[in-house]
Image (spheres, rainbow, N blue to C red):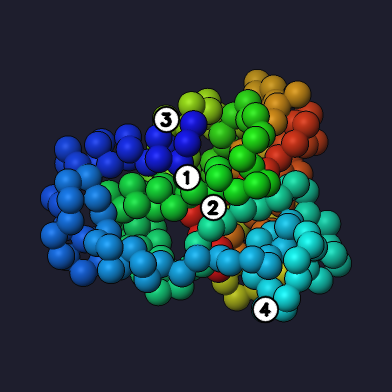
Amino acid sequence: MSIAGIREPFRVIGSLFYPALCAVCDDSVATGEYLCASCRAKAPRLNPPFCAKCSEAFPGAITSAFSCANCAHRTLHFEAAVAVYRSRGIVRKLLHQFKYGQQRHLKHPLALWLSETLDDARLRDRRFDAIVPVPLHAARERERGFNQAELLAELLSGTAGIPLHGALERIRYTTTQTAYDRSERMANLRNAFRLRKNVDVRGWRVLLIDDVLTTGSTLSECARVLKQGGAISVYAATAARA
């Protein structure tokens, strides 16, 4: 399915419930839109060259595929983690309002940004058996009221025609990752996830979904569990990259 085909259902569904105002500046927009043209143009994109593994942008003039130094010196269990937008400016604002401000309708513009990852060369021609959202611990989900990755994954699943499967569960309540470096994040997440009871992922090609890619530690640990359970491959996609 083309990106245009994926985007249209998001607009139609969302327009039934929310007024046609820009989510950033409140200017009028067309029915089913969420950002005005001016704000949409301010969303910072990740431009090449960037790391083929984790999408970290690089300021140099590199024309061939490469992996960054951070990826080269640690084991990441996903094949590639793809994002199209940088979590800066209006992108970061919408992510925070969605995740912490209870503005669930912002899942629609965020899912549009997420859907653009499917046009990336690393994902474009791949077949996926399931879309799997990164899970929250049950206590954290009760605090927040929802799992942001699951809401985004549901929209992408419905429009891309890839089955959604809650194959993973988070079994350990981990402290916030923001104060940790990469190695500390990996240690903090070790054995925090497992496959749900009676879930069989053997032979699956998985597209793992989260809202933001930071160091890749969470995605890597989820991918490790999926592959340990027999998944053939795990690619990841996020609405933005920190």
Question: Which residue is denoted by mark 3 in the rendering?
Answer: 158
Secondary structure category for the residue under label 3: helix
Occupied quadrant, residue 187: bottom right
Residue 15 picture location, percent across and down: 19, 42
**Which of the two discs, 4 and 3, labels the residue nearer the N terminus?**
4
Asked if residue 216 is positioned above or below residue 224 in the image, the reply reads below
**Which of the two discs, 1 and 3, labels the residue nearer the N terminus?**
1
Mark 2 → mark 3, Cα distance in angstroms: 16 Å
Amino acid identity at mark 2: Thr
The answer to whether the residues at label 4 and label 3 have Cβ atoms under 8 Å apart is no
Question: 132 or 190: which is nearer to us?
Answer: 132
Image quarter (top left, top right, bottom left or bottom right) of the C terminus:
bottom right
Residue 59 is tagged as 4
Mark 2 → mark 4, Cα distance in angstroms: 22 Å
Left or right relative to 204: residue 152: left
Occupied quadrant, residue 11: top left
Amino acid identity at mark 3: Gly
The answer to whether the residues at label 2 and label 3 have Cβ atoms under 8 Å apart is no
Residue 47 picture location, percent across and down: 58, 66
Residue 238 is tagged as 2
Secondary structure category for the residue under label 2: strand
Asked if residue 141 is positioned above or below residue 8 in the image, the reply reads below
**Which of the two discs, 2 and 3, labels the residue nearer the N terminus?**
3
Labels 2, 4: front one: 4
Mark 1 → mark 4, Cα distance in angstroms: 25 Å
Residue at horizontal 69 percent and vertical 31 percent from the top: 205
**Which of the two discs, 1 and 4, labels the residue nearer the N terminus?**
4
Question: Which residue is denoted by mark 1 in the rendering?
Answer: 115
